[in-house]
Image: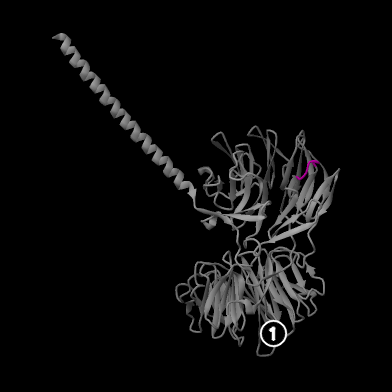
């Protein structure tokens, strides 16, 4: 009896143990399943939509580039060819230095400035390829065997502005972006590298094996190793990182206030304190650096004392690298490729001569003699003979530096150039004759726009826009007007005059002021006029009213009653660049920030967005002559017959 009872107890105990085991297994399975689902959800949340496809730029509608300097920024060697890239083109040279082909942005490549280039073998490819970062078109991948391009294009436009590239030993590609952190691409998946890098502006990348160093614009330096990310900020001379270099167990981070040296992943010391280091190259015993001022220096790693300069140059080095088995050091400068021989740098490749001094166009205007005046964002003024029968005249000084507007005096046939450092007045043959600043009565040195009108006496009057209000200049003297006297806002960006010259429109940071006889007659804002954004960037008189460009609402029409009307297609979430409006008898043109050229056909009464053929989607200036339109961008100047625009 006792034996049977014991057997029953044993059976019951075994059943209970089995049930407990099954319950525990079920619980563990559910936990594992939940964790797996959570991990997948987290991974999916970090996955980013993209396309990877052969590059096929849309047909060029007829834009012809006006040659601007190659402005080299990066170089790499691949399969017997040397590639040099600048914002406007990728140039391919033979081993002997002969230019074999030039791939131009907007024509052969997308309408986006080119950035750093690198050679790497990605996980999904058997051979090394050329990787090209772009400011707006993702990453371009050039296959030297097939001589074709593939484009890695994130679906989110914010992820397409790529500033740095690196590859891991596994073949994964790292993409540093302008504002959206660090991404990784393994051939099938595009994802955020790690959450620590989200929404950070990446300026430099360095990969050593699976260790990743990332320099940022204003968040210091990140180092990911063995699954851990270290962040360095206060330990650096400055939190802005220009570039990174490595040698052995040492990593160097260039900043505007010196170079941070890391040994075995930890901060060691600051080299060359106070030096704005822009480019670096490290070997076992020394560090070569280029300052932003253009001086190349050698720094012994056994001392913090700078050695004598190797040479003084007009342009800083953008990149140092070795290109062949000789071990010679090369420097990529905007004006060419240079090789270090002993203690001197000699030119190896230099860009072909160009019509323009710089790519970043800010203002355009034709003078009565037919020459095109080209104002640049930070390199002064070019006076260009568009027939190419005479050399370009370049002018640049403390006043002619940052150009905002170029205007023709229709009565005297002279030119006025509005700059960040005053108004420069030229005579009829193109020589600067006078500079007007605050010392001469202007309300501010910074002049953003200028418009001419004719007084009843027949004399000409200049109205100048500045960040402090308006200044009027005529034969009677100089006088100013600002917010205390009724101007809607002191910061005036754009001016336009009615056809009869009796009314001046001032577009400001806070809306529009309409003036007559030097007095404000009416102020128009989003509160009283139908205006959709108070920040006015461009204006022109057109028929019975005005066309207005805004910072955030595109283009609107203002009628004589003081009411703004949206324009279908062009009144949208869009920034119109300062003074980037032009009217012709058949078209109205608007230049946008990042959305290309907008063309309005007066016949069809319809706006068309144009992006193909432009060297950049940031369109900044216009001029017209003899049926041709000249269109300035941040990445070069192009020309197109107006007849080729949508009619």
Percent of width and height locating residue 154: 54, 54
Q: Residue at (45%, 75%) from the top-left corner?
A: 530
Identify which residue, 595 or 383, lies in the foreground: 595
- In-image side of 598 versus 348 (left or right): left
Residue 470: which quarter of the image? bottom right
440 w.r.t. 257: above or below: below
Q: Residue at (78%, 68%) from the top-left corner?
A: 395
Identify which residue, 222 or 473, lies in the foreground: 222
Percent of width and height locating residue 264: 65, 32
497 w.r.t. 167: above or below: below
Q: Which residue is mark 1?
A: 460
Identify which residue, 45 or 230, lies in the foreground: 45
The image shows a total of numbered marks equal to 1
- Mark 1 residue element: strand
Residue range corresponding to the magenta coloring: 322-327
Residue 557 at least partly seen: yes
452 w.r.t. 445: above or below: below
Q: Neighbour class for label 1 at 10 Å: few (<14), some, many (≥20)?
A: some
């Amino acid at each position: 009896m006792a034996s049977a009872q014991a057997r029953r107890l044993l059976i019951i105990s075994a059943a209970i143990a089995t049930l407990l085991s099954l319950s525990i297994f079920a619980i563990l399975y559910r936990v594992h399943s939940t964790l797996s689902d959570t991990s997948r959800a987290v991974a999916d949340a970090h996955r980013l939509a993209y396309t990877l496809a052969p590059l096929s730029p849309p047909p060029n509608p007829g834009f012809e580039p006006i040659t601007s300097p190659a402005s080299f920024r990066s170089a790499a060697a691949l399969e017997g060819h040397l590639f040099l890239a600048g914002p406007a083109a990728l140039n391919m040279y033979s081993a002997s230095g002969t230019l074999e082909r030039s791939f131009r942005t907007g024509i052969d490549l997308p309408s986006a400035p080119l950035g750093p280039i690198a050679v790497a073998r990605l996980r999904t490819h058997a051979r090394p390829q050329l990787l090209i970062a772009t400011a707006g078109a993702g990453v371009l991948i050039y296959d030297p065997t097939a001589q074709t391009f593939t484009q890695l294009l994130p679906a989110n436009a914010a992820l397409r502005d790529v500033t740095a590239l690196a590859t891991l030993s596994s073949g994964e590609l790292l993409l540093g972006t302008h504002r959206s952190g660090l991404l990784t691409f393994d051939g099938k998946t595009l994802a955020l590298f790690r959450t620590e890098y989200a929404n950070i502006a990446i300026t430099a990348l360095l990969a050593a094996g699976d260790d990743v160093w990332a320099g940022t614009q204003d968040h210091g330096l990140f180092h990911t190793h063995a699954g851990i990310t270290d962040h360095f900020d206060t330990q650096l001379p400055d939190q802005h990182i220009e570039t990174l270099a490595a040698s052995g167990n040492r990593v160097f981070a260039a900043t505007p206030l010196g170079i941070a040296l890391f040994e075995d992943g930890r901060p060691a010391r600051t080299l060359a304190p106070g030096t704005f280091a822009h480019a670096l190259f490290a070997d076992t015993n020394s560090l070569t650096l280029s300052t932003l001022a253009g001086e190349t220096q050698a720094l012994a790693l056994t001392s913090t004392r700078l050695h004598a300069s190797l040479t003084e140059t007009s342009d800083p080095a953008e990149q140092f690298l070795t290109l062949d088995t000789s071990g010679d050091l090369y420097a990529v400068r905007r004006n060419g490729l240079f090789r270090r021989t002993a203690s001197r740098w000699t030119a190896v490749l230099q860009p072909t001569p160009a019509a323009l001094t710089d790519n970043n166009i800010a203002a355009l205007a034709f003078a009565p003699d037919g020459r095109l005046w080209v104002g640049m964002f930070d390199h002064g003024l070019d006076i260009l003979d568009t027939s190419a029968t005479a050399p370009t005249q370049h002018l640049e000084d403390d006043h002619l530096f940052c150009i905002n507007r170029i205007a023709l005096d229709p009565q005297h046939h002279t030119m006025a150039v509005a700059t960040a450092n005053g108004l420069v007045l030229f005579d009829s043959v193109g020589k600067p004759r006078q500079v007007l600043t605050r010392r001469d009565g202007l309300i501010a040195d910074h002049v953003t726009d200028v418009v001419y009108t004719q007084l009843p006496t027949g004399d000409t009057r200049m109205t100048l826009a500045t960040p402090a209000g308006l200044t009027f200049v005529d034969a009677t003297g100089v006088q100013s007007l600002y917010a205390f006297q009724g101007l809607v806002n002191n910061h005036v960006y754009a001016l336009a005059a009615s056809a009869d010259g009796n009314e001046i429109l001032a577009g400001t940071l806070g809306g529009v002021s309409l003036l007559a006889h030097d007095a404000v007659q009416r102020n128009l804002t989003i509160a009283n006029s139908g205006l959709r954004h108070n920040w006015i960037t461009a204006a022109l008189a057109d028929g019975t009213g005005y066309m207005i460009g805004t910072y955030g609402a595109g283009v609107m029409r203002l009628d004589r009653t003081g009411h703004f009307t949206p324009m279908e297609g062009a009144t949208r979430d869009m920034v119109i660049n300062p003074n980037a409006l032009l009217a012709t008898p058949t078209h109205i043109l608007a230049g946008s920030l990042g959305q290309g050229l907008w063309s309005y056909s007066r016949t069809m009464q319809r706006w068309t967005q144009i992006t193909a053929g432009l060297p950049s989607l940031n369109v900044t200036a216009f001029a017209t002559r003899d049926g041709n339109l000249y269109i300035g961008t941040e990445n070069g100047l192009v020309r197109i017959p107006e007849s080729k625009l949508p009619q």
